[in-house]
């Protein structure tokens, strides 16, 4: 696919807060390797900069935080390259999670697939009334491959997570709050960035060392790295299947996929 936008990640510093805006609005901020590279570069810069105490991640265009993995990029990769791409995205999300500085996802519109998984790797998720969360992969013959099978059950419990993953149902902002996906009740779309800015300001005025230690204490759990590695292998396997070929083709052709027997 021809890259329609060069600057796939806009970074802005406002006082002690770094704003990272996913900027591929034509494809609802779908995540491709260019986005991962830009995120990686930004994370290295933020880590080294004591002047940045909080990070905000959001999406441009008003319709989506991100609609997930770029299906054009995923199509046509062989299984080994798919595993490489997924592993790379996972490492970037893990680096975000382990940045040692609070990261707030400001979600308006769709946070689907990898977009939801990116939000899950953030320390806090704040959503507006138009936010919609979901893991639609199984409808495409894929499985979540950017940490969703690991982080979502840890966050909302196995039953609710399996319901979202197996059925593809989307959680609107209110149910996302009730499920514990959102860290506070949804605000109006217009208020989202102000609300997040205010929260980021409050956090940035407190001890950055304490924040780093709180983040480490809360996330020092249980086998996440092993789970993520296993997920990468299984997601690459799914992406190499005939169901994935059919699912992605059907998405492109705007029709319902016809999957074979299991
Ligand atoms: N990868 C690549 N392109 C994507 C994309 C993705 N994950 N999600 C959306 N796009 C593109 C569409 O192909 C379309 O491009 P086009 O204008 O060249 O046709 C554009 O973004 C707008 O999306 P469209 O589907 O026309 O908008 P919509 O309002 O009808 O539907 C969604 C919005 C989010 C429901 C729908 O785009 C969707 O289901 N996207 C895929 C989500 C997904 O399965 N993510 C997980 C991938 S593993």
Image: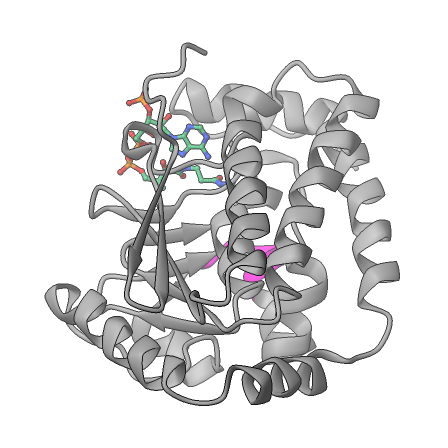
- Looking at the image, is 176 positioned above or below residue 76? below
Image point (72%, 64%), residue name: 150
Q: Is residue 38 magenta?
A: no
Left or right: 29 as drawn, with respect to 109 = right
Q: Residue furthest left?
A: 190
- Looking at the image, is 123 positioned above or below residue 33? below
Q: Residue furthest top?
A: 2
Which of the 4 quarters of the picture holds residue 57? bottom left
Q: Position of residue 106 (x, y in %)?
A: 34, 63
Q: Quadrant of the N terminus?
A: top left
| Of residues 22 and 241, the one drawn nearer to the viewer in this rendering | 22
Q: Position of residue 130 (x, y in %)?
A: 23, 62
Image point (31%, 56%), residue name: 13
The quadrant of the rendered image in which ligand 1 is seen is top left
Q: Is residue 113 visible?
A: no
Q: How many marks?
A: 0
| Of residues 12 and 32, the one drawn nearer to the viewer in this rendering | 12
Q: Which residues are magenta?
A: 164-169
- Looking at the image, is 38 positioned above or below residue 120? above
Which of the 4 quarters of the picture holds residue 222? bottom right
| Of residues 169 and 35, the one drawn nearer to the viewer in this rendering | 35
- Looking at the image, is 259 positioned above or below residue 46? above
Q: Quadrant of the C terminus?
A: top right
Q: Is residue 167 magenta?
A: yes
Image point (43%, 66%), residue name: 51
Q: Is residue 15 visible?
A: yes
Image point (21%, 68%), residue name: 192
Q: Position of residue 92 (x, y in %)?
A: 64, 48
How is the structure coloured here? one colour
What secondary structure characterizes most of the magenta part?
helix
């Amino acid at each position: 696919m021809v890259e329609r936008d060069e600057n796939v990640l806009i970074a802005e510093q406002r006082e002690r807060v770094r704003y990272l805006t996913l900027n591929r609005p034509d494809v609802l901020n779908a995540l491709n390797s260019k986005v991962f590279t830009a995120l990686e570069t930004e994370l290295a810069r933020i880590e080294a900069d004591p002047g940045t105490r909080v990070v905000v991640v959001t999406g441009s265009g008003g319709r989506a935080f991100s609609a997930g993995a770029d299906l054009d990029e995923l199509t046509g990769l062989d299984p080994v390259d798919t595993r490489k791409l997924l592993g790379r995205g996972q490492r970037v999300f893990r680096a975000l999670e382990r940045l040692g500085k609070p990261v707030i996802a400001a979600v308006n519109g769709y946070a689907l697939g990898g977009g939801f998984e990116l939000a899950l790797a953030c320390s806090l998720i704040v959503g507006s009334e138009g936010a919609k969360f979901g893991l639609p992969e199984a409808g495409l013959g894929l499985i979540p491959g950017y940490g969703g099978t690991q982080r979502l059950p840890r966050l909302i419990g196995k039953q609710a997570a399996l319901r979202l993953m197996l059925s593809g149902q989307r959680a609107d902002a209110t149910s996302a709050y009730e499920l514990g996906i959102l860290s506070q009740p949804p605000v109006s779309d217009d208020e989202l960035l102000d609300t997040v800015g205010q929260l980021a300001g409050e956090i940035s005025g407190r001890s950055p060392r304490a924040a780093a230690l709180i983040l480490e204490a809360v996330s020092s759990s249980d086998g996440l790295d092993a789970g993520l590695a296993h997920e990468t292998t299984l997601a690459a396997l799914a992406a190499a299947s005939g169901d994935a070929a059919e699912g992605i083709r059907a998405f492109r052709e705007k029709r319902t996929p016809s999957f074979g027997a299991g």
